Amino acid sequence: MKMKLMLLYVFASLLSNLQAQTIKESKWVASLGEEVHNIYSTPLNVPLIQTKSGKLIALEPSTGAILWNNPLYVNKIAPLDGTPCSFVNGNLLLDINSGRSIDLSKLFSGKMEDFYVIPESYDLFIHSTNPEFFTVVDLYELKMRWTMKSDISGKSLQEGKGKLGAAFMQMNSPNLETGLECPPITNKSGGVIIAGFGKLSSIDPDGKVLWSVTQPKKKKGMVQTVDNKTELMVDDNRPQFYLMKSKMMTALSTGDGSEIWPEFYAVKGDVLVDTETGLLPLTGYHEQGNGGTSMFAKTKINLVDYATGKALWPDDLELKGAVDQFKILPNGNIAIVTFNQTNSKFQVLDPRTGKFSYPEEIKLKGRVIDFVAGPDKVMFATSRGIDLLDLNTGNNLLSKMPKFDEDADIRTIYNKQFVYNIDTKNKDVYKTDLLTGESNKILRTYKFAVGEPLKKYDVLPDGKLFLASDHNMKVYSPTGDLLIDKPFDYEGRGWDRYNRAVNATTNTFGAVTNTVLLSVDFAVSAVVVLATTGTQYESAGHEFAREIQAPELETHRINKNQKAAEYYFNMKRLRKDVAAQGSFFVRRNKADKESYVSYVSKGTGDIIFDIPLEEDATAPEFAVGEDIGYLYYAPSFINQNKPSFDFIFNKERLKTAEANNKAGFIAGYQFD
C-alpha cells in the first residue's frame, strides 16, 4: 500500500513539475496496480480501462474511484444506444454503470441474428439462429424474462405445416407456430406481439402466450408478393395495432388479435401520424447500404378512419419522395420534409381538408438535419446551409444568401441571429443575418499551413470565428479580419504516434458531440428568429431538450418511454452546458524539447493546459469527451525493452518508469 501511494505521488509530482507553467493539476490520479492497455469512452462518460492482464475496470469520472472491475478481455465493445448497456465481445451484455452482466450465449445456442429494444417496456428482444430462439431481457434489472426455441425448419408437433410453418416451442404452448418476419412491437401489457410466418402472437412479460391467430388475408384479390415485407405498428392512443403487407394495411385488436377493419386498406407506409381526425400513414425514408429510398420514388397518402380503415379524403395526395421528418404544428397542420437521396423538400398538409398549403413541394438547400416552426416562419438546418421560409406562403426569406456549387461541402455554425456558412470547396465564409436577410462574404479563400483541410470550426459568444486544421488555428473578427494565426508544430517519434494521439481527441462519440452542439446552437437561433415573447413559441428550442442531452435515445425511439429516458439520464455524467471554450491540438515545444496534447483557447490561442508526451514510450492512451468536459490519460512510460538514449545510462530513471508502468496510472483532467 505504501509503495502504491509513493508511486502515485511520484506520478502526480512528475506531471505537476513538467506542466507547472501551463496546466492546472489533474483532478485525480488513480493507480490500477497493473499496466494499462486501452481506454474506452462510453455514452455514460464512465471510462472503461482495459489492463494488459485482461481486466476491465470502470472508473468514477469525477474522482477516479474504481466503480467495478471484471476479469474480462475486450475484443469489441458496442454500446446499446439509449441504455446503460454495451455488447462486449458479441454475446456479453454489460451494464457499464454497475458492472453487472448477462452472458447471452448461456441463454440460447447459436448466433444472435437481430436485436430490438422495445421502448415501452425497456426490454431487449433477441432473435438468434442455428437453432432459432427468441429471448427477452429486462434492461432495468439486466435479467432474462424468458427464452423460447423457434424451430422454423421443421414441422410443428401436431399441425404439420412443413417448412413454411414454424414451431414456436414452449412447455405451456407446444403447438404455437411462429417465426420472425419483422421487428416485434409492444402489446401494451409489458409483453410483445410477434409476426410469424402466417401467425400473429402476443406474449406476456413472463413468456406466456396470451393469444395466437392466423395473419389476416385480403378478402378480395391477393396481397402483392412484390416488396411483400411484413411490418407491425403500434397505435399509441387506441387498443389496436396495425399489420402492413406490401401496400396493404389492416387493424387488429391488441387484446385478442381479432380483426377490426373489414378489409385491408391499400397504402404503403411504415410511419403512422395520429391526427385529430384520422390516421395518416407515411412512407419513411430509410438508408439501405450506400443508397436508400429510390430518388424517383413517389408516395401517395390519404387519411384513414381508425375505426373502419376507410379513406377519408376523396382523392390521394402525392409526395415526391419518402418522409424524412415531420412535425404536427400547433394549428393541427402537419409539416412534412421528404428526401430522395438527392435533396430535401418541404410541404404543409391540412389533414382536415386533405389539401397542401403550397402548389408544389419546396426544394431546400440540402438534407434537413433539424427544423423548427414558429407562428409564421419555419427554419431548417440543412447539410448545405440554412433555409428560412414564410410558413403561410412558402416564400424564401433568405433570398440574398449565396448559391453554392452543387459539389460544395458546406459547414454551418450559428450565433443567435447570425449564421455562418463555410464553403470548404472554395474556402469562403458567408455571414447571414436571419432577422434582416442580409448576407455577405466575410472571408475569401482562407488557408491553413501546408494546405491542410478544415477540421474544427466554431463561432464564439462574442461573434469571433474559430477555424482550425490539425496544426493551425485562426480566429477572425465578426467582420472577417484575421486576429490570430497560430501554428502548432509537432516533431514526435513518427506519424503513427501523432495520429494515435490526435485521433483520441475525436473519439467514437465525437459525431454525437458535434450533433449535440449543432442542435443546441440551432435551437437558440431558432428561438431568436421564430419566437414571439410571451407565447408558447418563446421556448421553441427547448423541444429539443432530450435530443440535445441524449440523441442516442432516438435510435430505438426510447424517448417515448418517460421512465426509461429518466433512468438513462440519471446514469449519464453529462454537463448541462456543452459549449467548449477550447480545442485540442498535438504540438511540439521546441525550446523545451517536449511534445504535448494541448487544450487551447479558441478565442486567444493561449495554452489552457498541456499533457506531456515526452515520457511516453510508444502508445499513450487517451479518451476525450468534449461533451462532458473530461480527458482521461494513461501514460505508457519508458520500458526496459525500448528505452530512449537518455534512459539507457540512467538506471534509476528507467527503474522508476518501469514501476510507474506496473502501477497502471490513469489521470483525469476536467476542462471548461
Image (cartoon, grey):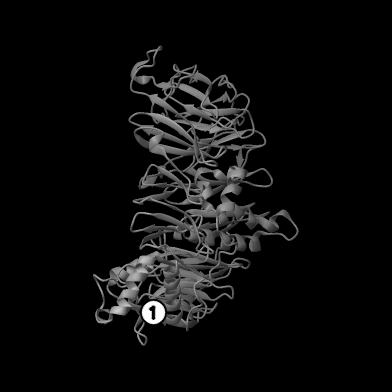
The amino acid on which the numbered mark 1 sits, given as a three-letter code, is Phe
Count of numbered marks: 1
Neighbours of disc 1 within 10 Å: few (<14), some (14-19), many (20+):
some
User: Where is residue 655 drawn, in percent x and y?
Assistant: 31, 74
Look at 54% across and 76% down and name the residue there: 464
Residue that protrudes farthest toward the front in the picture: 2
Dot 1: element = loop
**Of residues 413 and 555, which is closer to you in this image?**
555
Rendered image quadrant of residue 210: top right
For the question of whether residue 616 can be seen, the reply is: no
Quadrant of the snapshot with the N terminus: bottom left
Relative to 64, residue 331 above or below: above
Residue that protrudes farthest toward the right in the picture: 534
**Of residues 39 and 411, which is closer to you in this image?**
39
Query: In the image, is 662 to the left or to the right of 262?
Result: left
**Of residues 125 and 604, which is closer to you in this image?**
125
Where is mark 1, residue-wise?
488
Quadrant of the snapshot with the C terminus: bottom right
Look at 51% across and 20% down and name the residue there: 212
For the question of whether residue 287 can be seen, the reply is: yes
Look at 52% across and 41% down and name the residue there: 139
User: Where is residue 498 drawn, in percent x and y?
Assistant: 33, 71
Relative to 363, residue 475 above or below: below
**Of residues 345 and 107, which is closer to you in this image?**
107
User: Where is residue 583 drawn, in percent x and y?
Assistant: 47, 72
Residue that protrudes farthest toward the top in the picture: 158
Look at 37% across and 62% down and name the residue there: 34
User: Where is residue 48 drawn, in percent x and y?
Assistant: 44, 57
